[in-house]
Amino acid sequence: MNRNKGFTVIELIFVIIAVGILAAMIIPRLEINGAREAATQMLTHIKYAQHLAMQDDKFVHSENEKFWFKMRWGIAINDTSLQECSVDEPGVKSWKYSIFYDKRGSGNKFSGNLNSKEEVAIDTQKSNKFLSAGWRGIPQSYCNKINTDLNIEKKYGIKSVKFVGSCGKGKMQTINFDELGRPMRVVSVTNNKGAKRPYSRLLKGNCKIVLTDKNNNVASINIEKRSGYAYIN
């Protein structure tokens, strides 16, 4: 007569201990690295901004615009408090970014900021969304097009973004690209300031965008000066 042998109490205790040890080893590795995840997402969008700049040659499409070079595509990262569409609580800032190009607006001037849906890129993965976490003055009717993934503080816990190297001059945390995909310091600034000539703001050195999350994880996006090649380290 066969008898089915079950686990003894001692064996069960050993199994529980073994599972506990394995869990203690694995769980820390499952901790989300927000800085790395944000950098991976941003890298994709930086490359897309570069692609748009190469495909949308502003010189060709702006024959009557003397300052066509202020209309280059780029990525702008800001730590702002945006009240429109209830993006942020009053007085509370968050890190967010947008992919856009500038064009003449009020007073026939370049503002250096994203101001309309005509300027912002569309998310190729979510065709009903902008590649923007929102901007000042965005109409209520476009609130459902805001892409919350680009609010990297709320999405990934990013608490600091620093531009280091050739792109770290000044307060503007913006990178633009020319028609060859080469990186440039911000080409358009409020009140028609910024670039004075088509290629005067090409980076003379490499650029590094350093992200730090709430757990003090750090990730860096590197952009090479001549080719615009971007990668994470």
Image (cartoon, helix red, strand yellow):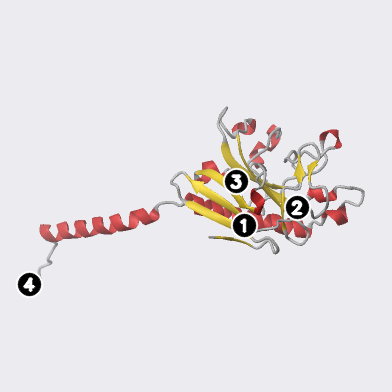
Label 3, on which residue?
Answer: 150
Label 2, on which residue?
Answer: 201
Amino acid type shown at disc 1: Thr
Of mark 4 and mark 1, the one earlier in the sequence is: 4
Separation of marks 2 and 1 at Cα, in angstroms: 23 Å
* Residue 167 x %, y %: 66, 51
Closer to us: mark 4 or mark 2?
A: 2
Q: Residue at x 69, y 34 (%)?
A: 136
Contact (CB < 8 A) between labels 4 and 1? no
Label 1, on which residue?
Answer: 44
Separation of marks 1 and 3 at Cα, in angstroms: 12 Å
Contact (CB < 8 A) between labels 3 and 2? no
Of mark 3 and mark 4, the one earlier in the sequence is: 4
Contact (CB < 8 A) between labels 4 and 2? no
Residue projecting furthest to the left: 1
Of mark 1 and mark 3, the one earlier in the sequence is: 1
Q: Residue at x 25, y 57 (%)?
A: 21
Amino acid type shown at disc 2: Arg
Separation of marks 3 and 4 at Cα, in angstroms: 68 Å
* Residue 226 x %, y %: 70, 63
Q: Looking at the image, how many numbered discs can be counted on the residues?
A: 4
Contact (CB < 8 A) between labels 1 and 3? no
Closer to us: mark 3 or mark 4?
A: 3
